[in-house]
Image (cartoon, rainbow, N blue to C red):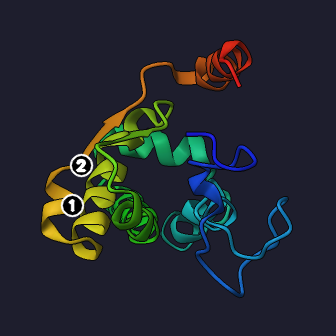
Amino acid sequence: MRGANGLAGELSHLHADSAGPMCRCGARGCLGVVATTDHVLEAARPLFGPDVNIYDVLGLAAQGEATVRRVLDDFGRLVGRHLAPACVMLNPELIVVDGTLGPAAAPVMEGLHDGLRRHMPDGAYRALTLTLGRLAENAELLGAAHLARAPM
């Protein structure tokens, strides 16, 4: 789906926080500027110190560190809570989640499932499949190439 001006499916521009930071689209509090690595780090720094970075978080997730897994689960739950209304309206069969999450994928996906399950009708949730993308760093480039070749 392209939508009237090409923004269909741009879930990162769903409204998440009216007091949130400005987005490059001009709106305030879009999901893409609220649910970020900075959000994860804000939650992780009180637990692991002010110098923790996203690579530290991913390393701790790979080691199965329970507290960082909870931070990542909460992050997934936040995203799921804000995606749920779009899923109710559009009733998609599939959501593909960024495949570059690495060791953070499992707890983020668990939280995402939970956030969606809590904020969607049961039938719509059961009809939805969440999967990790397999294109990793090539996803944006391959998607752009596909769009360029697609008829308007």
Q: Amino acid at mark 2?
A: Leu
Label 2 Cα crowd, 10 Å radius (few <14 / some 14-19 / many 20+): some
Q: Quadrant of the C terminus?
A: top right
Front-lying residue, 146 or 100: 146
> The N terminus appears in which quarter of the rendering?
top right
The spot of residue 5 in percent (x, y) is: 75, 48
Identify the residue under disc 1: 124
Task: Look at label 1 and name its amino acid.
Answer: Ala
Q: Is residue 109 left or right of residue 37?
A: left
* CB atoms of marks 2 and 1 within 8 Å: yes
At x 60% / y 22%, what residue is drawn? Answer: 137
In the rendered image, residue 40, in percent from the top left (x then y), is placed at: 55, 61
Mark 2, secondary structure of its residue = loop
Q: Secondary structure at mark 1?
A: helix
Q: CA distance from mark 2 to mark 1?
A: 7 Å
Is 81 above or below relative to 124? below
Q: Nearer the viewer, residue 38 or 143?
A: 143
51 shown above or below 135: below
Q: In which quadrant of the rendered view does residue 70 lie?
A: bottom left
Residue at point 52%, 65% (across, down):
44
At horizontal 64% and vertical 48% (from top left) the residue drawn is 3
Disc 1 packing (10 Å; few <14; some 14–19; many ≥20): some
The part of the image, by quadrant, that contains residue 124 is: bottom left
Residue 93 drawn above or below residue 117? above
Q: Mark 2 sits on what residue? A: 128
Snapshot quadrant of residue 116 = bottom left
Rendering coords of residue 131 (x, y %) = 31, 36
- Relative depth, front residue between 24 and 124: 124
Q: How many marks?
A: 2
Above or below 18: residue 66: above
